[in-house]
Image: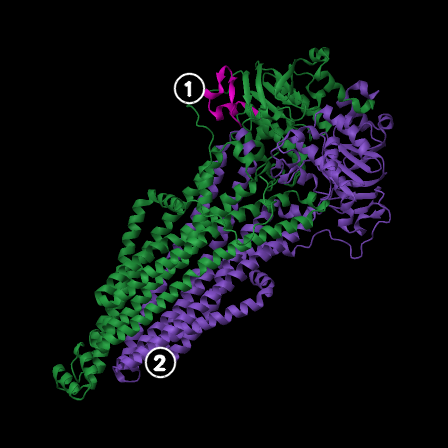
Chain colours: A green, B purple
Amino acid sequence: MSMGMGPMRGAGVPVQKSKNLRGTTRRLVARLAPERLKLTMALVLGVASVAFMVSGPQILGNATNVLFDGIVGAKLPVGSTKAQAIQLLRAHGQGQLASMISGMNLVPGVGVDITRMGEVLGLAAVVYVGGAVFNYLQGFTMAGLTQRVMFQMRQDVEAKLSRLPLRYFDSHSHGDVLSRVTNDIDNLTTTIQQGLSQLITSILTIVGVMGMMFWISPLLAAVSIVTIPLALVITMLIARRSQSHFVAQWKKTGTLNGLVEETHTGHELVQVFGRSDFVVDEFARQNRSLYEASFRAQFLSGIIQPSMQFISNINYVSIAVIGGYRVAGGLLSLGAVTAFIQYSRQFTMPITQIASQMNMLQSGVASAERVFEFLDADEEDLELTPASGHEPVSGRPGSVELDHVSFRYEPGEPLIEDFSLKVEPGETIAIVGATGAGKTTIVNLLVRFYEIDSGRILLDGIDYRELGRDQVRRSFGMVLQDTWMFSGTIRDNIRYGRPDASDHDVVAAAEEAHVDSFVRTLPEGYDTVLDEDASNLSSGQKQLLTIARAFLADQSILILDEATSNVDTRTEVLIQEAMSRLREGRTSFVIAHRLSTIRDADTIVVMDRGRIVEQGSHEELMKVNGVYFALYNSQFSGAST
Amino acid sequence: MVLIGLLVRFLRRYVRQISVLVVLLVGQTIGNLYLPNLNADIINQGVVVGNLHYILRTGEWMLSLTLLIGLASVVAVYWASRVAMGAGADIRQAVFTSVQRFSARDMNSFGTASLITRNTNDIQQIQIFLQMALTMMVIAPIMCFGGIVMALHEGAQLSTLLLVAVPVMAIFISVVMVKVIPKFRSMQTRIDRINEVLREQITGVRVIRAFVRDDFEADRFDHANVSLTDTALSVNRTFALMMPAMMVILNLSSVAVIWFGGRLVSEGSMPIGNLTAFLTYILQILLSVMMAVMVAILVPRAAASAERVMQVLETTPVIEDPRSPVTPRDLNGRVRFNGVSFSYPGSERAVLEGLTFTFEPGATNAIIGGTGSGKTTLLNLIPRFFDTSSGVVSVNDVDVRDQARDDLWHSLGIVPQSAYLFSGTVASNLRFGRAQASNEELWRALKVAQASEFVSQMPGALDAPIDQGGTNVSGGQRQRLAIARALVKRPNVYLFDDCFSALDAATDARLREALATETQGATVVIVAQRVSTIMHADQIVVLDDGRIAGIGSHGELLESCVAYREIVVSQLGEDAAR
């Protein structure tokens, strides 16, 4: 996976499309399924809230009408009827005004009916407050709902991490995986949190307002309706183009994350090898391309909102003009027009809102796709349910047999070929061989980090395939090259191998690994908190801690993989003693490069290119005068040359 | 506030774009404010008096205004996106570039993982905030101010209502904010915590599985997840109150406008059309406040991120180049320690004390000693990853502190304890120190490093892909490639930090033999655990607890140095020590 090494693609090249926009959206929606009940409740509350809110302007419009009636009424002669007044106006050539009045509910000569207006406004106030209460309840319900959905999503990601085969981690950039489970999940959470609730309210409002508009004036409503398909088409046209840029944006964020991670990890190398300028340039190049993608995504999705506002304004103007005509023609009340203008605002506002949420939603869907991709990655093969009677593996003697095992990392590139080895309980097996002979791979197979392609491995006579992976691993105590510690206290890190160990046991294990005296010199002792990379410890100290960890885990089979290469020789002598004590009665696999440390192994297995070339005790192999003999002597060649 | 400082610093470049943006937004907002005014005219001078011609003419004018507003806002979005994303990219570049100047100690004090988050996620937060702020932060005040002016214009008496509505809203928002902001901060730390756990689980996957601690890890994650969810829930529920409460304030204001306005209209002191316009203005004023709130929601997170980014930008590396660097006259490769002591800051115990010796060019020099005896620390003083507490380290006969670090590093080839390769190809890794090296030179280096055999078997050979960290080759192969990488650079000082540990004894021996001819004339410094690796060195420095326990050849040390003898006996047996 060489990334970003190729020549930059021109800015005009179309970016990759979201692979499956509809499918991803559907899967996101499916995630809401367990919350059906709450979602329905939120919907009902939403409907109630919208119904209240939507009737508000209508009631306010009535108040305007009462007002307008009073004003116009006051101008007309006192005592005359409405019909008389209209006739009078017509006679004076004011037909326009006359027809308007004909549509009004007024009594000539009588001013504004304050009491009636008070009643109407009181009702409006009640309706508004009621709507708000329902709205709050809806928001409250939605908050719980979305949080639970996201909680579950994060749990799923976590669960997935533990089900992925090691192959996945070995073949994907850590930075990119990390970006998926952090940056993308983060972005998705924000989207769902802010987007979903608003989306529901917006859609409900559109429906409610539309109903009201039709009720007040079908003509004006029809005018407004025309703008909807227009709005939809524009939104979709823009959204489709910007979506692909969002996908590119998140993909490039992942790549950039990878570059940052590797440069920071190899910081000193970059400096000493004079690569700083080059790396900064490379970063600039990728940063630039991320910038282009994110700019396009932002701009394109950003123009949705002004476009909607433009449509909304056209709508507003149409209503003002047409409404004005209708009122003047007496076909509509002024209150209806005012109410309508408010409605048209209320109507375009949720559309605008959906539109402005669009970029967030789009970016969220792009992230969701990356998260789903992660969740869809091939998992470790399903395990057979462990056959009954095979459960208590611990406490078993610990015999291991590899029977004609073959394995390859890449199809077509055989690595371990027809490997057979039988180990009796309590034996110490040393595996030696040139670098790349397949020693580490054997460890990967023994603890089932990888599954074998053919042959079988037996643990106490039981085929691995009949056991759970965990059962297999629980039989092994390991000291790996990897001195990984988690951020926590030294005590908890030692206890990692056996969580129920007492403090006393922890200290005892530390003493055996000769790490106790060092730990005691730390100001916080065993409660010293290791930071993320355990950078407050030297690599030798970390190695000692991992040894203590293995001591405490106390399993029937041990794997020591180059474990002692970072421990100084004097401490190592003591560890060797402790190790041989620990090896008593336990089966041990030792992978070491210093042949002096394995001389007392029961069997030494010499590997070359994935096969066993020699096998036997130190004395036996020395007599054979073969590969081992050569290896052993070359150790001292430094002295002779 | 740090956020403002950061923005001011990075937006300075965009002053012109921002001015254009502001002008456009002001125009757009004024246009939007003027529309209700025209609407009022339609009612007052068109509808009420039945003037259809006036209605139509004003309608046309409103339509053209609408078009102008639309155009202005599209251009505004263009510049807002350019500026926000541009500034984001600039900040990313600045952070990345400044980390490049960091010394080892600076790297440690931040932690690699934290620096990665600061370089990506944190800047993303600032970018999102900026995008919102650039439009809304400009529009909101103008809209609010303009709305007030227009409202006053429509009906001065009615405007007293604003004296009630706006403070009520402001007080309400402040109360919610005061409640929510601390929660937001704790939400951010909990997000960080979740990410930290995930990061550890990805890097430690082998150990976790080996010890079958998936359940424990799941618990750890569960704990972090629950605590994040709790906080997020409480934040969101508080926010759920915000919208409805604002709507109530807004709508009740409308009711009040009609009530009081209605009286004014019926008294004849205000035209009825103004009432409708007034309603729209009230709506816009309160809307602008809400907009400000939406931006304000993003502030806590952006502010926290800005602080974290600023910390990186403001870090003065503990080690910097001298103001007037001295260029060594002769690049002979001599490395000299003169009375060197070193202790970590804040630590009383010296890691190294009183070291004096010279590594001569053309000689192989070795350092041997126990874990924690200070071998790697000693090596780190040569490329000036750390500065001595006292005493002088010189390379090419010039104090390393007087040299430009790039010059210094040019002379050095390092092979670290844990080999690290970069994603790319075998060739791109080998050319790391000298980009113009020919393929022949690469093969030569690979041969010396005992790596030519496996590289030639890799698909694509020199062009075979290498994953990040070099995880697709074995530990021993990684080390040999790292050695070849140093050889290609052809420095005059080689520093091998215990890098033969993953090699089997036979490869180790062949490699050292080949190395001896290849590095002729250069200064070679080897740190090792294995006596067999270093016993033929010209000079061996035996370190014990940061002090020199002995210096000399293998034979001399066997005679004079007890510590060395012990090591030899423990590794090679009693015979070898005779």
| First to last magenta residue range | A449-477
> Considering only vertical position in the picture, is B258 above or below B315?
below
- Where residue B310 appears, as percent x and y from the top left, is 60, 56
Q: Chain of mark 2?
A: B
- Tags 1 and 2 touching, CB below 8 Å: no
Q: Chain of mark 1?
A: A
Mark 1 neighbour class, 10 Å CA radius: few under 14, some 14 to 19, many 20 or more: few
Q: Nearer the viewer, residue A354 or B502?
A: A354
In which quadrant of the rendered view does residue B42 lie?
bottom left
Looking at numbered disc 2 in the image, what kind of residue is underneath it? Gly
Task: Name the residue carrying label 1.
Answer: A387
Q: Along the horizontal axis of the image, is A457 left or right of A322? A: right
In magenta stretch: residue B168: no
Residue occupying image coordinates x 50% and y 54%: B185
- Where residue A304 appears, as percent x and y from the top left, is 41, 60
Residue B33: in sight, yes or no? yes
Task: Name the residue carrying label 2.
Answer: B155
Looking at numbered disc 1 in the image, what kind of residue is underneath it? Ala
Q: Along the horizontal axis of the image, is B134 left or right of A582? A: left
Image quarter in which the C terminus of chain B is found: top right
Image quarter in which the N terminus of chain B is found: bottom right
